Image (cartoon, rainbow, N blue to C red):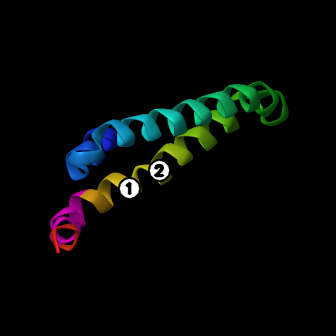
Amino acid sequence: MLGAYMVDCFRKESATVTACNNLVRYIMAGIGSLVASALSHAMGEGPMFTFGGALIVLFSINLYLIKRYHKKWAALRKN
């Protein structure tokens, strides 16, 4: 959803935005894959999934901010 919003905001640079989004997404997936096994052994499965859920809630704040301020940001971008 965030990637589609970014492409909509930067229509002239849509390929660059998509490439940057994919780069960050794949880097984060690689880091997550490296860390998940060690984290699971260190914390246990229950606390690890609780921590993962808390991260998802924390990162979803971006969606709330976009929903709330998108008109203001679009007006600033046009100026």
Mark 2 residue type: Phe
Q: Residue at x 77, y 24 (%)?
A: 37
Question: How many numbered markers are drawn?
Answer: 2
Quadrant position of the C terminus in the picture: bottom left
Residue 50 position by quadrant: top right
- The secondary element bearing badge 1 is classed as helix
Q: From the viewer's perspective, is residue 79 above or below residue 44? A: below
Q: Is residue 73 magenta?
A: yes
Classify mark 1: residues with Cα within 10 Å, few (<14), some (14-19) or many (20+): few
Q: Please name the residue that numbered disc 1 is placed on.
A: 62
Mark 1 residue type: Asn
Q: Please name the residue that numbered disc 2 is placed on.
A: 59
Give the x, y percent position of residue 71.
15, 66
Contact? badges 2 and 1 (CB < 8 Å): yes
Q: Looking at the image, which is closer to me, 21 or 35?
A: 21
Q: Is residue 74 magenta?
A: yes
Give the x, y percent position of residue 10.
26, 51
Q: Residue at x 28, y 58 (%)?
A: 66
- The secondary element bearing badge 2 is classed as helix
Classify mark 2: residues with Cα within 10 Å, few (<14), some (14-19) or many (20+): few
Q: Looking at the image, which is closer to me, 40 or 13?
A: 13
Q: Which residues are magenta?
A: 67-75
Majority secondary structure of magenta residues: helix
Question: In the image, is 31 to the left or to the right of 60?
Answer: right
Q: Residue at x 23, y 52 (%)?
A: 9
Question: In the image, is 59 to the left or to the right of 18?
Answer: right
Question: In the image, is 38 to the left or to the right of 49?
Answer: right
